[in-house]
Amino acid sequence: MTVDEFRALLANTDLFLYERSVDQSQGTVAAMVRRGLEKMVAVAGEKADLFAGKAEGELKLCPLSNENARALMTLFPYTKPASHKGHAFTMGFGDRLGLASPGHIRALGSHDIYPVLAQQSIRELNLTHRTFADVISAAAFNVFQEGYKKGYGADGDHLKTKDEIKYALENGCTMVTLDCSEQINQQAVTFPQEQIDALYAALPAEIRDHYEGTYLNKELPILGSLNAEELRRIVIVFYKGIDHAIDCYRYIDQIKTVPVDFELSIDETLTITTPAEHFVVGNELNAAGIVPISVAPHFSGAFEKGIEYAGNLNDFAHDFVVHQQIADHFGYKLSLHSGSDKFAVFSTVGRVTRGHVHVKTAGTSWLEAMRVVAEVNPELYRKAHKFAIEHRPEAEKYYHVSTNVADIPNIDLQNDAYLPEYLNLPAARQTMHIAYGLLLEQPWFSEAFFRTMAEHEEDYYAALVRHLGKHVNILTAKTDI
């Protein structure tokens, strides 16, 4: 089967062809096609039997199932996620809908950025009723649709246990972001020194001896020195988290079947990560022979979902420079979590890291989908908007936000032309941001929403190019340091 023969077969059908997707391998030609609003893989040739589908003449039309995604990855390996080790600038694009990756790919433009297109946490999977296999399959089909052959990753984001890690890796994730927040004693940050001293004295002698022998009365790179009180507090707060990270890394090393990128998240804490805390964590990993691909500290200021950075930009810059020095010392990248829409810090992040960084986005792509809904299906947007406000207390069980619904203008007083502006108002934006799981559970919403997105997919891609392209352009702006 040749490409010309394949195109001739399609010419006699009612199928819409995604031109960028047409590809050939092992005597087989395949492409993404659409009939009405239903997308499929059309395949013909020697390896068509890899796919499950219905024959229409010499063509086989195959649904976008996990089974067919695996077949696609076999026939076209570039559709399978892979490690991003060795790539300087990497960016996580959480696609909670399975629709956004073409827009994400286009937003990269000509920039040398390795995208992690499949990025989901267990929380997100539960709220959207998806699996890691579903998320990776959607990314594979979208990569194929765009004809994108530069590689992409799949991140099991904010995993906390070995069981979650196993689940992610068995389903094809090539990156694990380990969240140690449940092993970090966050409350101890505020304990009086007497309580810290008592807890420290109760630790096994070998733990105390190790930390004191490593850090006390030492001239440490970047930090200089640590005093005994500071060290005791760091140990009480972090030593269990450090042990958990080492244990989980070794577990990954035992069970992985492909290269896996290991990121450590210490950002889900109540207080900012001090340079001393970051240094001790990095040094303990280094002593265990572990160099993560990236580490996510809790930086100064507020990185809330879906809205701009809140905080003193000079404090952030000073803080970020020291964290970058520590990351450089131990040989990994910094990772910026909740990076969506934090335009005020992007210039600093790009300049200080010199483009060696990992930035995560997620919910902003959902919000851009809702912007499209506001523009083309105002009745659905109005109903979703009211639902999100009404159910915000329930959504806040999953996400911390600080805005107030009282600041959202009454939608009944606004005309349809104004509706997209709600996605620019922090309170409305956050309210819609955290409501995605609750909304997608509602048949009245999900059916109309996915139909609207299918009818306006190019509008959605264009919105993502505008919005995430702005992220990329500021982060990668070439400025002398």
Image (cartoon, rainbow, N blue to C red):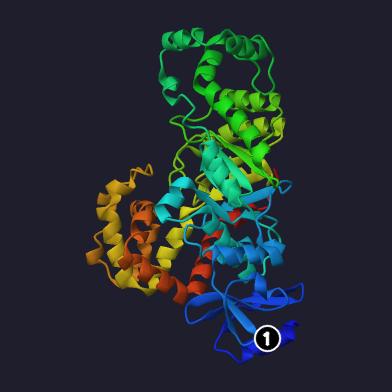
Judge the density around disc 1: few (<14), some (14-19), many (≥20) Cα neighbours within 10 Å. some
Residue denoted by label 1: 7
Residue that sits furthest to the front in the current view: 49
Q: Residue at x 43, y 44 (%)?
A: 304
The image quadrant where one finds the C terminus is top right
* Residue 104 visible in the current orientation: no
Is residue 364 left or right of 212 when viewed as pictured?
left
* Amino acid on which the number 1 mark rests in the picture: Arg
Q: Residue at x 61, y 32 (%)?
A: 323
The image quadrant where one finds the N terminus is bottom right
Across and down, in percent, residue 263 comes to 61, 39
Looking at the rendering, which quadrant does residue 330 occupy? top right
Across and down, in percent, residue 426 comes to 37, 52
Is residue 76 left or right of 427 when viewed as pictured?
right
Q: Residue at x 71, y 28 (%)?
A: 289
Q: Secondary structure at mark 1?
A: helix
Across and down, in percent, residue 355 comes to 68, 47
The one of 71 and 402 positioned closer to us in this rendering: 71
The one of 3 and 404 positioned closer to us in this rendering: 3
Total marks drawn? 1
The answer to whether 304 is drawn above or below residue 223 in the figure is below
The answer to whether 415 is drawn above or below residue 280 in the figure is below
The answer to whether 291 is drawn above or below residue 357 in the figure is above
Q: Residue at x 73, y 86 (%)?
A: 4
Looking at the rendering, which quadrant does residue 32 occupy? bottom right
* Residue 260 visible in the current orientation: yes
